[in-house]
Amino acid sequence: MSAIQLNNLAVGYGRRTVLSGLNATVESGGFYAVMGANGCGKTTLLRCMGGLMNPMDGEVTVDGRPVADYSAREMAQRVAYVQQRPLTDFEFSAFETVLMGRNPYQRKLQNESQADWDIVEQAMRQTGTWHLRLAKLDQVSGGELQRIMLARAIAQQTPVMLLDEPVSNLDVAHQFDIMDLLSRVEGKTILIVIHDLNLALRYCPRLLLLGDGGLVYQGPTADGLTPGNIRRVFGVDASVSDGYVRFLH
Amino acid sequence: MGDGFLWFGFFFVLLQTDFEAEPEMSAPAHNTRRYGWLPATLAVLLVAAVAWSACSGVVKLAPSELFGSDIFLNLRLPRIIVALLVGAALSVSGAAYQSVFRNPLTDPYVLGVSSGASLGAAVAILLGLEARVWGIGLLALVAALATVWLIYRVASIGNRLHTSTLLLTGVCLTLLLSAVVTFLMVLHQDKMESIIFWTMGSFGSASWFDVALVAPVTAAGVFVVLYYAKDLNLLLAGSETAQSLGVEVEKVKRMLLFFTTLMVAFAVSACGVIGFVGLIVPHCMRLICGPDNRRVVPCSILGGALFMLSCDTLSRTLLQPAELPVGSLTAIVGAPLFIYLLYRNKKSY
């Protein structure tokens, strides 16, 4: 069953088209790597799937229903989205930030319940950020910030998670921790933007490879990260053997 | 007069206390700073301030004679009520603006919205709409909304608001609009009680009529801001994040900006332009009870009313029988605080 469907999608900013003629199916429960060169439209694609920007043409459907038909609240109960560079210039603590992930389930004028607090604590323990709960976001490191944001997405308890570069600022150990955590999650559809080809090969079974203003490849990651595709998308020569990419640069 | 300084003392103490020093957290109280005493204290102080204001002035009144006194019933009481309402309206608007614009230095005065409203009100008076009940308020509202819209358009780049552009636009508009008001006033001196009324603000002419105009609008505006208090928190995390966490960002921003601007417009048409209230009151509250707007907004209602009434009472008792423009008193407190906030902001980056 498909969780997200892209039909002849075209997106862009102002008069500039970033992606066009995009057709793709994101299977429910899949763990996808979204890859491509800088500025090729990975973030734009994720924002479109999350209903945060409107397509110029075509449509995005989530659970078979066009994104435009969802209210923000309904969307937030289905799709969690974590920005690449979240804003940190405000006074809320890490705990309060993760608690915001429970907002889609609360009514106006309704406060958080004990259940919300427990969900937040669990999400923060999973991502190893519980000890940072009282810290302000501009006092934590880049990697800690990414893990706090991931905790918020987990606390949001959505069937779909869109994570824009969730491991790019992490040290090696935390990269493995987070990728292990994401691949252990069952029943969720996860799309992550990731630049490390080897991490993608090791952890993400599915791949959406973007290039030339459209989709270059969709399918199993191992079949997609070929020397030819890497050459085409990144302009770098590489060899692939035993599930490892070796650059010949 | 001596007790007047107590109120200022109160605010200065708030500023100087180190509220960042939080007690050690114990699960599950993850983020609850103790703040329950704040609304209670503010409420007690508010009652005391009302009593103080009711009794003092050129004509001293004993509490027992208040309700038999024309001076109290027809002059002081409406003045007190309008001051309370305007204080609450400006402070709540300031709290909302600071979250919607994601900028701690914004309030209706800094952004020029108050000046816009005063221009609208002045034009209404010059056109002779004074007699029509809603004429002044309506034109003030239209001019204030136009100001907000202009600022928003100028300062939004992509889907972000550019901080320095926002503030600079506000400062320019404030200067421009108040210059136009001054110009109009000089041309039509006969129609004005005084130019100072519009440029520095005054509750001197507050009547029951003003109460009837300002009260319903303030009640509606305050309710709307309280209703969206949680969304205001999410807006602080950025529009995109707020949207992805279930906030209808555009709709909520429009609602909040409309209703807060409505409050400001009616406040200005009742008492002229009073600066800095909307800036310093929410900040004082935030320093004590943290950034959560579900606390900041209710405390700002009480704190704003208290601050405005204290300033107004001081303005008419400090140099009596002369009356100081209340705007000059709020500026004496507000401007140094504004600079202090800029300074503190600088250090944190």
Image: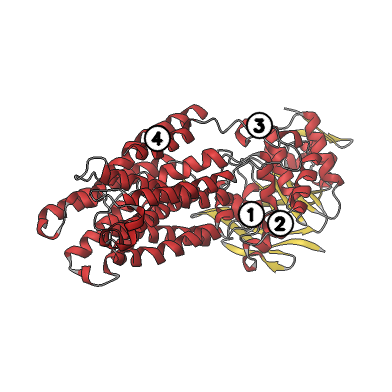
Which chain does the residue under circle 4 lie in?
B
Left or right? Give the position of B250 relative to B113: right
The label nearer to you, 1 versus 3, is 3
Rendered image coloring scheme: secondary structure
The quadrant in which the C terminus of chain A is found is top right
Of marks 4 and 1, which one's residue comes earlier in the chain? 1
What whole-number distance in Å separates the C-alpha atoms at marks 2 and 1? 8 Å
Neighbor class of circle 3 (other Cα within 10 Å; few <14, some 14-19, many 20+) is some
Residue at the spot 59% in from the left edge and 60% down from the top edge: A55
Residue type, label 2? Val
Residue at the spot 54% in from the left edge and 44% down from the top edge: B38
Q: Where residue A205 sits: x, y (%)?
A: 84, 47
* SS of the residue under disc 1: helix
Tell which of A181 and B37 is nearer to you. Answer: B37
Which chain does the residue under circle 3 lie in?
A
Residue bearing the label numbered 4: B337
The quadrant in which the N terminus of chain A is found is bottom right
Residue type, label 1? Ser
Residue bearing the label numbered 3: A140
Residue type, label 3? Val
Q: Where residue B69 sits: x, y (%)?
A: 28, 61
* SS of the residue under disc 2: strand
Residue bearing the label numbered 2: A79
